[in-house]
Amino acid sequence: MVKRYLSVISLEQALSLLETVPVSLTPETIPLEVSAGRITARPVFATYSVPEVHLAAMDGIAVRSIDTTGASEQSPVTLPIARRVNTGNVVPAGYDAVIMIEDVWVDGDRFTVRKPASPWQHVRPAGEDIAESEMVVPSYHRIRPSDIGALAAYGVVSIDVLGFRAGLVPTGSELVPPGTRPGPGQVVESNTRMAAAWLTGLGGRCTRYPLTPDDPEKIRDAMLRAAEANDLVIVSAGSSAGTKDFSADAIASLGEVLVHGVAIKPGKPVIIGRILDKPVIGMPGYPLSALTVLREIVTPLIRLSGMPVPEPVIIPARLTATLHSEAGSDEFILLAAGRVGSSWVATPLSRGSGVQMSAVRSNAYLQVISSLEGYEAGEVVPVSLTVSPAEAEEAVLITGSHDPVLDHLAELAKKDHVEIHSIHVGSMGGIIALKRNDCHAATIHLLAPDGDYNVPYLAKYLPREEIDLIGLAMREQGIVSRSGISIDDLPGTPFINRQKGSGTRMLLDHELGSRGISPEDIPGYDREATTHIGVALAVKTGEAEAGMCVYSAAKALGLSFVPVASERYELAVRREFSEDPRIRALLFAIRSPRFKEILHALGGYDDSITGVLRRVP
């Protein structure tokens, strides 16, 4: 029998339904020193006063203030009794003030003062910081490092914090553990590790159960064990409508399926149910679907339990690309966001449910609500940050031509608190993004008919704009293959190309034209990859026999490489941003000896132009 979703409800309805399956919070007592970030389960009180007795706040003498009455420069008073004290010493009983030693004339055991002391001057009274039994922090308080220092000083060595126990059940016969290289049809189990990290950040104590194959009885047994021992159960995979998706049936056999299908994208097959009156969430197996469910379903569920879960910071950002979305579903799109000039801009990343690198490369996301069919490029939209605003301010958006060396440049720049986000749209795409102020910099390598690189295109598409070109490297482009194919061998050879507008494709077309080779004679010429590594990988896996890429990509995958041309690979930046600390840090990284070492190690690069500045115009 073909399975169907039991129901598909709106996200709003799903969030309302969560109120019927609350997560029970389970307080636990933990050592104070490991409590940072946790939420207090009940108020915490000081076990003693601090200080417990009166203490001197200055080096000097302890006195009875009444004995100093009338003291002046004209009528100094020699004190009948006084005691020497240092800062932090106990003020003896019967004394109620401290006079700084520099204000005292000392003659052996005799102390003379020339001005009166007020009661309790320079004295820390008992309980000045906190009194015994006084509340230090209330319940539902997120513990900060400064709180830990204070609590330790007030005699607290352990603390009761809120939490919940989460059982994570990975299902699927195709799963293998991390550290195992997956074979054909196998997948490394990563979703429950992501879920464990996510839930731990919300105060959860997570137990990951063993990999469970696609066997209904074994899945049922694993779910039951998890429900018996935990306050929340997360089941990874098996929630769709395939022939081996058993999660919904297993939940139904042990308890109740409340929802199978929520109108969100990615994440539509999510299951909400209960076993032993414990909430059970079935996550789809695709990583970005699972991430969406954790963020949009599980996090609100935890928030409803009473745990203080912070909401994301929302900023207004201008979209750099048009987004089409399916009406009727709330779609969540990962973004790379950064402040360009005085405005925030956001670039959509790949929307494939299995593309985990989109999550790695993103620092924000956009919710396209179900009543909309998307947004147009240039619209200002509410963007939710997945990092702090300060981290988002460090972002540098680089749009244009891909090169493996950009990842290494990002590593160098990170040391100066600059976070590079590279968007690979080809050199022409980079120029258009620069023209629209959609990025901080564009990576380009466009060969002009006169033999120059980049400058003619900038002059054409950004006339009257002041642009600085920063040399990254001269790099070798050539034909990658498994058998030493050259450009003259391409007719009749299955090929993988780069996208239209990329400098690599323009260079290829130029070289083919100079040889009189027609693209129509090259099978696969219209098949496109967005990165040099993508080209090399297609060749390595046998999807194509040849492609054109930089030498470093071919070398990284152990493939043959026949050079075609050496080209100028540069970074174009608006001159008005040249004093931006992020751009200065980027230039410093490019000009560093370490960057040149990396170029040489990767191979296929000449550093003769690295860090060289050209101005247009």
Image (cartoon, grey):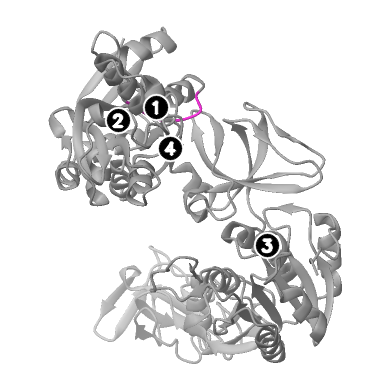
Residue in the foreground of this view, choosing between 191 and 524: 524
Give the residues in magenta. Answer: 437-444
Distance from the alpha carbon under mark 1 to that under mark 3 = 36 Å
Q: Residues within 10 Å of mark 3 (few under 14, many from 20)?
A: many
Position of 598 compared to 344: left or right?
A: left
Distance from the alpha carbon under mark 4 to that under mark 2 = 20 Å
Say what secondary structure mark 2 lies in.
loop
Q: Mark 4 highlights which residue?
A: 530
Q: Amino acid at mark 2?
A: Leu
The dot on residue 312 is: none
Q: Nearer the viewer, mark 4 or mark 2?
A: 2
**Of the residues under marks 4 and 1, which one precedes in the sequence?**
1
Q: Mark 3 highlights which residue?
A: 293
- Residue 548, given in percent of the width and then of the height, sits at 31, 34
Can residue 520 be spotted in the picture?
yes
**Of the residues under marks 3 and 4, which one precedes in the sequence?**
3
**Of the residues under marks 1 and 2, which one precedes in the sequence?**
2
Residue in the foreground of this view, choosing between 540 and 555: 540
> Magenta stretch containing residue 442, yes or no?
yes
Distance from the alpha carbon under mark 2 to that under mark 3 = 47 Å
Q: Amino acid at mark 3?
A: Val
Q: Residues within 10 Å of mark 1 (few under 14, many from 20)?
A: many
**Of the residues under marks 1 and 3, which one precedes in the sequence?**
3
Relative to 447, say whether 337 is above or below: below
Q: Mark 1 highlights which residue?
A: 502
Q: Quadrant of the C terminus?
A: top left
Q: Amino acid at mark 4?
A: Thr
Say what secondary structure mark 4 lies in.
loop
**Of the residues under marks 2 and 3, which one precedes in the sequence?**
3
- Residue 86, given in percent of the width and then of the height, sits at 34, 81
Distance from the alpha carbon under mark 4 to that under mark 1 = 9 Å
